[in-house]
Amino acid sequence: MTITQSEGTAAVANSVLPARIPTVPGTEWWRSAVIYQVYPRSFADASGDGIGDLQGITSRLPHLAQLGIDAVWLSPFFTSPQRDGGYDVADYCDVDPLFGTLDDFAAFEDAAHELGLRVIVDLVPNHSSSDHVWFQEALAAAEGSPGRARYLFRDGKGPEGNIPPNNWDSVFGGPAWTRTTNPDGSAGQWYLHLFDSSQPDFDWQNPWVREQFRAVLRFWLDRGVDGFRVDVAHGMIKAEGLPDYTAPADSGSMGGGQVDPLGLEPEVQVTEAAPTPPYWAQDGVHEIYRDWRELLDEYSGDRVLVAEAWVDPMAKLAQWVRPDEMHQAFNFAYLGTTWTGPRMRRVIDESLEVFSSVGAPSTWVLSNHDVVRHASRLALTAENPQGHGIGPASPGQPLPELGLRRARAASALMLALPGSAYLYQGEELGLPEVINLPDESRLDPTWFRTNGERYGRDGCRVPLPWEANATAFGFSPTGESWLPQPADWAPFARDSQIGVAGSTLELYRLALALRAEYQLGFGSIGWLPGYGEEVVALQNGPVTVIANTGTVPVELPVGELLLCSEELVGGILSPDATVWLLAAH
Ligand code: NOJ
């Protein structure tokens, strides 16, 4: 074979890439966009209090532009007591002082747009914080009054009313109901919270709730945001009568069925549906999204709605992205697929088919702030359901080298696929899950609600390392960091990797540059014959992509090498590696 870049070296992309907005002039930018998730607490801290903030994010934006992404999605930065990392909102139209001010947000947004980056913010409509004035007023209102009807208050069962209204569990562990106390000190009604007790669920059958959220959407749209990632987009409507439900033993923690995360079952069908719980994926959610879509369409500039919907099977998820509903939905089936050839091909085929059947792009995602980072997850040897996290006592500890190798290969495969891809901050540095966090530093409500039985998600939320030799690796100017960073993170720091051939950061930069150059996001794929079961070999436009998920080295076709996730020796692709070529046909 001919390898025109220096053989055996993962190449370095050229300097800073020009701003690219929109991806193709006049088109719907989101169809092919690479969207980078910023978790504000952990991205960059300008104030020095050890918690990331908006000014910190703004100061690092040029680095994101240099990475070659199209948009930034910010996890919540709104007023919040931070009982669930800001997914417990106490004021939807203001910035929490921890993160800055509305002016800081405006400055961030202007800087992002200036650099050609779109801005997506998080919308958390299933529940508010219990500190929200809407909930405080509901608590103060009389039972059965309109004030109470904003949330799901119910009488308890039994003569004393001391049995919860139904048997639902919270996603974070423990019951999904908490009993209130009346002003006279007597025990009162119960309220539903699918997540923490500090996150009461709204009653979305109530027109008042719908009206409030239309105003929230307009507030941010008027401030120029390019779209919303909609939290728990599968949960807002509950089945009539709130019937009891017992989940099957293997269902995932964010709802719906979990695609076998480790490939322990040889023949898991991605299309197999778990039973639909009465609190997830109810048909009534769709009229809400149709309403929001109409509202967004009043605004110019291609604003988007992205569903965080854990819905199984994928064909059902596609209903969230019908032409008059949301624009995209996260592809969690892809995230949950093991690094095995047949499964990867199957989930890719199914994703492309199912989403295109409703005219939507498929999305691809490997990591986010709720799951074990894929540089660790892909080398776990025991099951770890979504949201459970890993800690020192977890079974199946990952092998770091294998995990990173697989993560690089998996990311290189993902970024070659048509549609839109989501990156989670730090994956471009190859960051692993942090397993040995001191217990006293953990903040995830999952940890507390399960009495430490589930470690939860803190391990994927450790603040980013920017500079190898700076205090807190450049995360904060004071050395403060709300979760401790591992002492051995210097090699992961951005400045250890930028411009370094073969680094994970350069692999991502090159993949993103080539993805844009060859318009892979707008492409279509065909499988290439002649490879073993464990080899994912595809053609997207002129680019041949070969990912080796197996244990046997693979001989590559003759062609010009564009990218390789591992060094090639003698034109051979080793296990757990991916290559992009311009093959000579
Ligand atoms: C999904 C979010 O991604 C997660 O972080 C949060 O805890 C739950 N929704 C509840 O809002």
Image (spheres, rainbow, N blue to C red):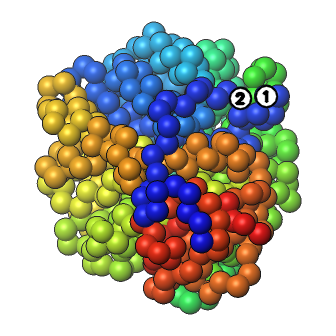
Residue 46 lies, with reference to residue 102, above or below; the image says: below
On the picture, is 576 further left or further right than 229? left
- Does the image show residue 279? no
Q: Amino acid at mark 2?
A: Pro
Q: Position of residue 362 (x, y in %)?
A: 71, 55
Q: Position of residue 246 (x, y in %)?
A: 54, 74
On the picture, is 458 further left or further right than 61? left
Q: Quadrant of residue 244?
A: bottom right
Q: Amino acid at mark 1?
A: Pro
Image marks 1 and 2: residues in contact by CB distance under 8 Å: yes
How many numbered discs? 2
Locate the C terminus and report the quarter of the image it occupies. Answer: bottom right
- Queried on whether the Cβ of the residue with tag 2 lies below 8 angstroms from ligand 1, the answer reads no
Please, what secondary structure does the residue beneath circle 2 have?
A: loop
Residue at 23% across / 32% down in the picture? 474
Q: Seen from this angle, which residue lies furthest top?
A: 103
- For marks 1 and 2, give the CA distance: 6 Å
Please, what secondary structure does the residue beneath circle 1 have?
A: loop
Assess disc 2: are there few (<14), some (14-19) or many (≥20) residues with their C-alpha within 10 Å of its C-alpha: some
| Residue closer to the observer: 136 or 280 | 280
Which circle marks residue 22 in the picture?
2
Residue at 74% across / 73% down in the picture? 527
Which circle marks residue 25 in the picture?
1
Residue at 63% across / 17% down in the picture? 224
